[in-house]
Amino acid sequence: MRRVHLKSAQSAHFNTIRDINRQIVLNYVREHGPISRAEIARQALLQRSTVSAIVDALVVDGLVEDIGKGDSTGGRCPTLLRLSGGHPAAIGIDISPIYTTVASSDIAGCVLGKKRFRTHPDLEKTLSRAIDAVAELASQAPTSIEGVGVSLPGLVDPLSGQALYIPYFNWRNVDIEGRIASATGYPVTIDNDANAAALAELWFGSPEVSETSDFILVFVSEGLGTGIILDRQIYRGAAGAAGEFGHMIIGQKAPVACSCGSYDCWEAFASGRAATARYAQLTSKTADTQQPTFAQLIERALGGESAAENALLETARNLGIGISNLIVGLSPELIVIGGPIARAWPLLADIFGAILERSVRRGMPSARIIPSTLGERTTLMGALSLVLSAKFASVRTI
């Protein structure tokens, strides 16, 4: 039971109750559409007149649309409702160590347009290209854009809009939110890539994930990060620093340095860079020869190349050490593995199954480990979710 915090509590005035009912109706349309007004009233235990008034307002706001008549169950054929799609409602900017992707989507999360370019280590060049892409995508329907979400591979403070430290490019204390908002004229929300990916799983993942109250997203790409969902919301901690489990110590003398410079961190043992370093050692490749990317390494492992498979399996075993710590320490219902590594699930499932057997203590509830169902789109959908989730989130009264 959540304790009421009197300094931030909001009394349940009429407007609060109305807003809560509006969000309930909107989420019924989102999750169960096409659906009729009568069915929403039955399932939500609301008066039909209340539902009709809310739906009328949602239609005027462009969030919901009528799509015609449904089948009769004995009376008049009901009018069915769905989210109003097909026009841009949000823009997401997903900045990764290799590529930056900018995309627009409708309110249902369907991607409508996309631009992609290599991320430049020079902050000004990357931001300039991203802002140009936002302007181009927004030109299709500039007045309907709710905002811009930005996913970043590093430590950020969502409250201040600051990118505190992006280790791949040594970007420090940059007002990403203010820079993009000033240039585009849209509200901007930022978060780190793991939190954004966890938010995407919550809002757009499979029902197995989206209907789970507490889960941890372990995002493995060139680096490694975790996003924590508690009570169906991101847990960010002070200054957005929660979930930095990639820096917990799990050993010594890793094959690569962590983004923080240490050779002891989980990221140094279990990231994509660790996997490619192991592959180089197994194949006696030097730094001067062309190294495969993490995605290419995964494809080689899936294709049966033994060196690639061995490098990936050793990385997964180290990934499992950290996952075991998360299970023992936080007891989540679910661990979701996201990022490029999710493609290799057929090779890794047995390893993660063994992790569960060793990690769950007798008498304690068991967790589950599953791959992300969003695939390579996880962080891009996360950037979009930073905007879209605000349209559907519950109105908080405490």
Image (tube, helix red, strand yellow):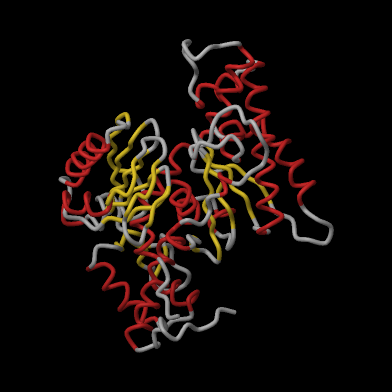
Which residue sits furthest right? 362
- Give the number of marks: 0
Who's the residue at 74% across and 41% down the image? 353
Q: Quadrant of residue 19?
A: bottom left
Where is residue 244 shown, x and y percent of the image?
Answer: 53, 50
In the rendered view, does 142 fall on the left or right side of 63? left
Residue 266 vs residue 90, the one in the foreground: 266
Q: Is residue 319 above or below residue 25?
A: above
Quarter of the picture holding the C terminus: bottom left
Residue 45 vs residue 120, the one in the foreground: 120
Q: Quadrant of residue 54?
A: bottom left
Who's the residue at 36% across and 38% down the image? 170
Q: Is residue 92 above or below residue 223?
A: below
Who's the residue at 36% across and 74% down the image? 22
Where is residue 313 shown, x and y percent of the image?
Answer: 67, 28
Quarter of the picture holding the N terminus: bottom right
Who's the residue at 37% across and 55% down the image? 386
Where is residue 250 shown, x and y percent of the image?
Answer: 67, 41
In the rendered view, does 138 fall on the left or right side of 339? left
Where is residue 316 shown, x and y percent of the image?
Answer: 65, 34
Q: Quadrant of residue 275?
A: top right
In the rendered view, does 15 fall on the left or right side of 352? left
